[in-house]
Amino acid sequence: MMASNTGHAEPQPVVFPDYPFKLGVASGDPLQDGVVLWTKLATEPLAADGHGGIPPVPIPVRWEVAEDERFRRVVARGVEQTGPNLGHSVHAEVGGLRPERSYFYRFRVGSEISPVGRTRTAPAAHNQPATLRFAQASCQHVPHGFYTAYQHMAQQDLDLVVFLGDYIYEGPAQGSLGRGHQPPIEISALAEYRVRYGQYRSEPELQAVHASFPWLVVWDDHELDSDWADEVPSDGQPIADFLRRRAAAFQVYYEFMPLRSTSIARGIDLQLFRRIHWGRLATFHLLDTRQYRDAQVCGGGFADCPEAFDPARSILGADQESWLIDGFQRSRARWDILAQQVVFARRLVEREGILTTRMDAWDGYVASQERITEGWIDAGVRNPIVLSGDVHAHWATDLKLDYLDPAAETVGSELVTTSITTDGNGEDSFGDHPIFADNPHLRFYTNLRGYVTITVTPEHLAADLQCVRRVTEPGAEVFTRASFVVDDGVRGLRQTLDRPPTPDEARRLPDRTREEAIRALIAKETADP
């Protein structure tokens, strides 16, 4: 042991019994001069105690950022002190970088070196870049399928990935693919959440996408518990137990996500809504529709529910609503993109002769839905786009202020991404669904799995709805099922590609009546996968 000049003994460096970077690397929340770099030390990601095989002592982790993959031109370096209080996670907030540039990064502990990641800074605030290309994804349930979608996504030329929630699932599902949840229980404690995230982050395809592009992340419900709302659990568990669970889930979410220190969990609270600017081309308004919402009414499923129209109810909470509307008023971006969790547009579903809407989505908070829509109209937002997830299907939708008036003006567009794997293989359709008859603003639907690739230019926003043939078999084909364009200054979607099912695929489509298809939709969206 060597002595320092102060006479105090320097600690021995930690010797790891195995590779400590098994969870890979990631980056997120890029600014024009910097980005968050992430890793988490773990030699045993599934260790039951939640420590990942790492001793409970402080460990310094060095990081480097370079202009080249071989690190001959290092432009920034530093050291982050990790410890057991945040599960030996690293969140290095790097500054001093150049705008609109790609960089490579890596971490070191002793003689161990992490995989190399690639990230990108945002354009300068006053610049309008020629293009922005990103992927929109959500709902990645390990027991339900293989991460083939990510295998293909990692090979694309993207600036960002926007992930809209359900990064993990909290239940005990085991499935039939040999990919059962670990631990095999419904998780509720800190160590259990760490093991579950460790299992998900051990997926090589997911690691590859994290290492290839910076991510913008928000959560939905399954990062904590199905259909939770603020401090109200959905399944009758005691409030005190739920709040302890919430604090544990929030801490582990921060530990595993490439977020800034402004999002460190503080007890049962975590600041997640925020803005990311991509020069003057686009602004992402990242929303949190779980932590501040009023509890769901009328059972939380599909219902004809007068309480949903109560003007006092909010899905965002008053402060976040004000923050969002203020952002609309201040925006100078060509495109304003709301990146959030649950379906924004009205979806009327006939049930036993009554038109119902879904209480867990924005339809359960009609006043919020209207205030936000009026907010971007009143602010003169040039091109409002809503990105959503949650429902495990691709939907393309025109947004209205009055959904009950067939002649109502279109005031925006919504793109809902299907799941990466949740609900298994799914099924294709002819882009149609029986509820379209009552919802002329709905433009497209398919229940296959996949993600959305979006290209933004000053002239238009183009969305390709990517689909995976089968998620229960690794290496399946990914193809573009449909494409839509929103032209600058023009409200509404314009379809540019429809790749319908082949005759053989069409023969395998479910032969359902309209009523059976609606019942299947309700059952799917009210199930707890």
Image (cartoon, rainbow, N blue to C red):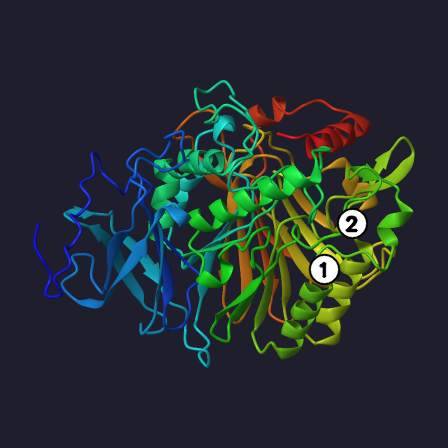
- The residue depicted at 30 percent of the width and 59 percent of the height is 80
Instruction: Name the element at disc 1.
Output: loop
Between residue 152 and residue 80, name the one nearer to us. 80
Give the mark, 1 or 2, whose residue is nearer the N terminus: 1
Between residue 253 and residue 479, name the one nearer to us. 253
- The residue depicted at 70 percent of the width and 40 percent of the height is 239
In this rendering, is residue 11 above or below 227? below
Image coords of residue 494 (percent x, y): 64, 57
Amino acid bearing label 2:
Asp
Q: CA distance from mark 1 to mark 2?
A: 15 Å
Which label lies toward us, 1 or 2?
1
90 left or right, relative to 292: left
486 left or right, relative to 231: left
At label 1, counting other C-alpha atoms closer than 10 Å, the crowd grade (few under 14, some 14-19, many 20 or more) is: some
Image coords of residue 16 (percent x, y): 20, 38
78 left or right, relative to 94: left
Quadrant location of the C terminus in the rendered image: top right
- Specify the farthest residue to the left: 2
- The residue depicted at 72 percent of the width and 43 percent of the height is 232
Residue where numbered disc 1 is placed? 317
At label 2, counting other C-alpha atoms closer than 10 Å, the crowd grade (few under 14, some 14-19, many 20 or more) is: many
Image coords of residue 35 (percent x, y): 38, 64
- Specify the farthest residue to the front: 7
Instruction: Name the element at disc 2.
Output: helix
Q: Count the marks: how many?
A: 2
Image coords of residue 347 (percent x, y): 77, 46
Residue where numbered disc 2 is placed? 363
Amino acid bearing label 1:
Gly
Q: Looking at the image, do the residues carrying marks 1 and 2 touch, with CB atoms under 8 Å apart?
A: no
Between residue 450 and residue 253, name the one nearer to us. 253
What's the mark number on residue 469? none
